[in-house]
Image (cartoon, rainbow, N blue to C red):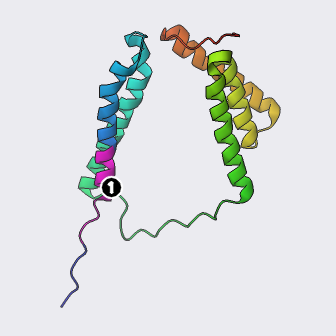
Amino acid sequence: MAPAAAPPDRSELFIGLGFAALAGLCLAVIPRAIGPYGAEATILPMIGAGALGLFSLLQIGAALLGRGASDEAPPPPLAPPLTLAAWLRLGAAAGVVALSAWLLPVLGILLTGAAMQILLFLLIGIRPLPAIIIALAVTAVLYLAIHTVLGVPLPAGQLW
């Protein structure tokens, strides 16, 4: 007698449904939670939530069609455990982000964002000059796109 077939793995379907629920929650909450800013401040978060919703639909469709990870595929090789240096670098990155959030009301988005990016780039091993150039360029482009083009007010800070 042949062994009974294992039930299909529906974890990918549940992941897609979870993403869909999260996207729906975000789309429902973002317009109400934006605070004193107008509707233009919801544009970027709504685009992100909409992209998450589209991703969830793709995930659900792949799971229903059976196009997800198959049992025949070999498992990916396991990554080696993190070293103490990697854990310290990860903790330092979390500290940089927390410090940036704390300094944002004082320094504003331009100074805080550029400084945070420079420090994070240095933590992942990018040399100082390219880190500074990339961080300043990204900060300028994001500021122009969000503040100037979309008209979304960004935190100015007390110093600048």
Q: Which residues are magenta?
A: 7-18
Amino acid type, callout 1: Glu
Q: Quadrant of the N terminus?
A: bottom left
Q: Name which residue lies at 54% across and 15% down.
A: 145
Q: Name which residue lies at 41% across and 29% down.
A: 48
Q: Name which residue lies at 33% across and 26% down.
A: 29
Q: Is residue 11 on the magenta stretch? A: yes
Dominant secondary-structure state across the stretch colored magenta = helix
Q: In which quadrant of the rendered view does residue 36 lie?
A: top left
Give coordinates of residue 43: x percent, y percent: 40, 18
- Relative to 55, residue 43 above or below: above
Give the labeled residue for mark 1.
12
Q: In which quadrant of the rendered view does residue 102 lie?
A: top right
- Relative to 148, residue 90 above or below: below
Give coordinates of residue 8: x percent, y percent: 25, 66
| Horizontal side, residue 130 vs residue 16: left or right | right
Q: Secondary structure at mark 1?
A: helix
Give coordinates of residue 9: x percent, y percent: 29, 64
